[in-house]
Image: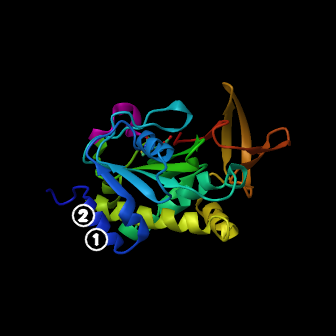
Amino acid sequence: MTKHALSAEVICAALGDHPWARRLTVLEQVDSTNTYAKRLAAGGAPSGTVVIANCQTGGRGRLGRSFLSPPDRGVYLSAILRPTAPPEKLLHLTALAAEAVCQAVEQATGLRPKIKWPNDLVVGRKKLCGILTELSLDAQAGQAIILGAGVNCLHTPEEFPPVLRETATSLAIELGHDVDRSLLAAEMMRQLALLEEECLTKKSMWLKRYAADCVSVGQQVQIVRDGEARHAHADGINENGALLVTYDDGTHDAIFFGEVSVRGMYGYV
Ligand code: BTN
């Protein structure tokens, strides 16, 4: 086994007696950990069930995009959460998942990324991690939220395709040394478990931390809806994690995830 192989054993050892350690599946390769986790959720898998893969052949991103997931390079992780509140009370989870992963990256590596609204982790102007939240509704198994996160860990710049080279980065590139993906995965599990536990009881604390980490706030942004782009100032984050903006004509709006694509004006998109 290489020094930085993704290993269920190392992840579980790092988690100790944490309850999520009992419901972990580590796969060498899968189409998408989110798709796999959705199947487990439909089969009744409990909250805290986690799927991690060393490689995804069909990694999925937001807005129908794909997510580059080569072998031996990243942490591709999906967690099943079954919070008791109805979906409309959990809209902020999508944004706060980024805050949880941000915290995990810092705990595991010492590097604290920033967040590009709604839930990309960035270092400088480059993307380090993407997050895809999906709702799974099954008549028998009930409601589940699938939180999927892909963190670029060991990629060298040359390993990103030319179209991504200017906009993507990895922990190894930023830190100048390799990181232990298993320890990062364990920390991601800890922080996501904490988020599930506190997302209703400590919501405002989490949102405050999120807003402090979100680089989009206070910036000029471009909002693309149905192919039409409008410029706006990002004023803040509301209680659902929506981005509050003021357009150039002075009108205000609250932008929800999935509905639009928001770009920083000068750099990372
Ligand atoms: C984005 O950048 O738009 C979101 C990317 C989310 C990627 C992660 S990797 C683990 C999980 N499985 C997937 O297929 N997607 C998410």
Camera-side residue of 195 and 96 = 195
Where does the magenta region start and end?
A: 158-166
Apparent side of residue 92 relative to residue 47 in the rendered image (left or right):
right
Q: For the residue labelled by badge 1, is the local secondary structure a helix, a strand or a loop?
A: helix
Mark 1–mark 2 CB contact (< 8 Å): yes
Apparent side of residue 13 relative to residue 231 in the rendered image (left or right):
left
The x and y percentages for residue 141 are: 55, 47
The residues tagged by marks 1 and 2 sit, at their Cα atoms, a distance apart of: 6 Å
Alpha-carbon neighbours of circle 2 within 10 Å: few (<14), some, or many (≥20)? few
Q: Which residue does the numbered mark 1 point to in the structure image?
A: 13
Q: In which quarter of the image is the N terminus?
A: bottom left
Camera-side residue of 49 and 255 = 49
Find the residue positioned furthest to the front: 140
Question: Which corner quadrant of the image does residue 36 belong to?
Answer: top left
Residue 104 can be seen in this image: yes
Q: What amino acid is at disc 1?
A: Ala
Mark 2, ligand 1, within 8 Å: the answer is no
- Residue at (28, 51) in percent of width and height: 154
Residue 75 can be seen in this image: no
Camera-side residue of 86 and 59 = 86
Question: Which corner quadrant of the image does residue 67 belong to?
Answer: top left
Mark 1, ligand 1, within 8 Å: the answer is no
- Say which mark, if any, is on residue 33: none
Judged from the image, the quadrant occupied by ligand 1 is top left
Q: Which residue does the numbered mark 2 point to in the structure image?
A: 9
- Residue at (39, 39) in percent of width and height: 32
Q: What amino acid is at disc 2?
A: Glu
Find the residue positioned furthest to the left: 1
